[in-house]
Amino acid sequence: MAELSTNESYKSSSNNSPKYLAQSNPLYGCLRLTYSVLGTVYESILEMNGYEGIMITQYFNPNIRGTDYVQQTMRMRSSPRGIVILGYNPVYPGTSRKHPTYIPDNFFFQVRPNGDYIFAVMDDAGQLSPVEVNQCSRR
C-alpha cells in the first residue's frame, strides 16, 4: 500500500511523521496505530481513501478471554482545534454483524504553533491518550 499522503506533490520531511494530517486535503493510504485505553493495548490498521476509510483493530477482550477483532468506518472532519477521525459502526471484520461491546474510536490530530504535534485517541468525555503512528509495511 502506498504511504499516506494528501496529494502527489506533497513531500513529508519524515516518513513516520503524521504532520501531513494538518492539511485539509483528503487522505489516501495506510497507517498502523497503537494505543492503550484503561491498560488494554489496541493495534489498528487505518486505510483512508479521501475523507473516509476503514480501520480494523485487534485487542484483548476480557469478555471472550482472548483476542478480538473489530472493523469500523472512519470519517475525517476538521474542527477549530485540529482534525478528528471519527469511528462509526463497529462490526466483525468482513461482515455487517454489529460488535456487541465495542465503542467506536475517535482520533484527534493537531500541529502546535511550535511544530510539535499531538495524535491521540479521544474518548466520549474528551480525554486524550497518545497514539503511536507508523506507516503500514509495503507489500
Image (cartoon, grey):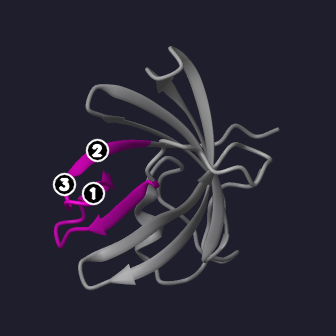
Region in magenta: 104-132
What residue does disc 2 label?
A: 130
Task: Pinpoint residue 130: horizontal percent, then vertical percent.
Answer: 28, 44
What residue does disc 1 label?
A: 118
In this picture, residue 52 sits left or right of residue 138 = left
Q: Residue at x 18, y 73 (%)?
A: 113
Residue 94: tell me if it is visible.
Answer: yes
Circle 3 SS class? loop
Please, which residue is most extreme toward the top here? Answer: 65
Q: Amino acid at mark 3?
A: Gln
Q: Amino acid at mark 2?
A: Pro
Number of numbered markers: 3
Q: Residues within 10 Å of mark 2 (few under 14, many from 20)?
A: some
Q: From mark 2 to mark 3, how far is it between C-alphas?
A: 10 Å
Asked if marks 1 and 2 touch (Cβ < 8 Å), the reply is yes
Circle 2 SS class? strand
Pointer 1 or 2: first along the chain = 1
In this picture, residue 92 sits left or right of residue 63 = right
